[in-house]
Amino acid sequence: MTLLQTAPQLETMSDGERALARVEAWFANEMIDRVPVRFSAHNAFVEQAQEKIAELSPAARKAWWFDVERQVDLFEKSLAGRTFHGETFPVYWPNLGPEVYAAFYGSELIYGEVTAWSVPLVESEEDVERIELDMENVYFQTLAAMTRLALERCEGRYLVGYTDLHPGLDCVAAWRGPQQLCLDMIKRPELVERLAEKAIAGFETIYDHFDGMLKAAGQLSVSWMGIPSRGRMHIPSCDFSALISPAFFRRFGLPILEREVQTMTHNIFHVDGEGVARHLDAILSVPEVHALQWVQGVGDDLPIMQWVPFLRELQERKVPVVVDLKPEELEPFIEAMDPEGLFLWVATASEAEELAIIDRLLRWS
């Protein structure tokens, strides 16, 4: 595998090469001079550069999402007057919703203001046979067009990433419906295994297509998380696993995960809350899972301090982890934790606040 030797130089970011070096050290559970920090909250991208489209008809909302030039324009508008600090790489990633991978095989997506969801595709055995990867369909080709346009326009200003890819049980749940998939695991496990094989079989082809576009343009490998790699970076996840037992995850989810991560240089598993965390032993049994992103949730799952024992356990297991913090949580968090293996995400309100946080992290480390 050929790795990029240097990080692209960005006029919107100070010292991108040094920032990338901190990221690479974090992947190795090491630290150069401080913990890496990204000044953005989890899921902040759903609000970034968005126009209010809730009042539009379903067809008009979908057209808005599929307007290639508009989407790149909106992202570029969000860069105006900004300097990105720490490890906050400015990244345009083409986005048609979290279930777009299922749509490459024939699912129809319904679009809302900030996300999209799949209409179940599989109701019969015959439907399973009809599932085929179609790289010429409108979802795939629109993402490719977004990628091409951003690559044409990005030089010196931002990185271009690839879209969110879910080839595991999340894809099967999109095809079958989450509730029905839960029943299938009990009543029709062979159907689940067939669908899981369909979901993972084309993953390398899809990933290689978009990765090839980025590599040909001298780009790093990066997606919605904004954490880049000189090689091949991927964000495996299984949000559906919050609904199932560890035994079912090991039977149906783990074999997909083991195949999904094999050819990647860096994998960051997206742990979406306590329900997914119940499968942590199985997830971390895969050597190619190099790091975790911990998403503690909302409501009673806040604030972050209640999860300090869990995060300390990950440190003891030598697992690098992304942690989302509010600015007012930073000081008590620093007092309670060692910096080892941490990558902080902090939603900030000003450049001065970001520079002050960087100074504090240098003194912590």
Image (tube, rainbow, N blue to C red):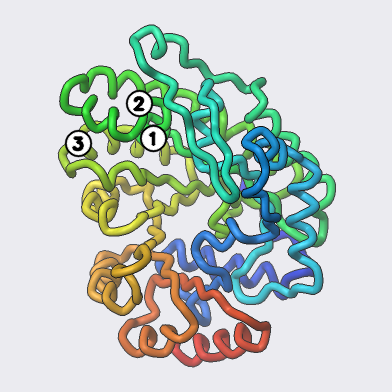
Classify mark 2: helix, strand or loop.
Answer: helix
User: Where's residue 150, x and y in %?
Assistant: 77, 47
Q: Quadrant of the N terminus?
A: top right
Front residue of 75/118: it is 118
Dividing the picture into quadrants, the one containing residue 175 is: top left
User: Where's residue 108, x and y in %?
Assistant: 54, 26
Mark 1 and mark 3 residues within 8 Å of each other at the beta carbon: no
Sequence order check, earlier mark of 1 and 3? 1
Classify mark 3: helix, strand or loop.
Answer: helix
Mark 3 and mark 2 residues within 8 Å of each other at the beta carbon: no
Q: Which residue is mark 2?
A: 196
Classify mark 1: helix, strand or loop.
Answer: loop
Mark 1 and mark 2 residues within 8 Å of each other at the beta carbon: yes
Question: Measured along the vertical axis of the image, is residue 332 above or below residue 114?
Answer: below
Q: Residues within 10 Å of mark 3 (few under 14, many from 20)?
A: some
At label 2, the amino acid type is: Ala
Q: Quadrant of the C terminus?
A: bottom left
Question: Measured along the vertical axis of the image, is residue 109 above or below residue 44?
Answer: above
Q: Please tell me the numbered disc located at residue 248.
A: 3
At label 3, the amino acid type is: Phe
Question: Measured along the vertical axis of the image, is residue 34 above or below residue 2?
Answer: below
Q: CA distance from mark 1 to mark 2?
A: 7 Å
Residue 6 seen anywhere in this rendered image of the structure: no
Who's the residue at 45% across and 62% down the image?
27
Who's the residue at 45% across and 86% down the image?
328
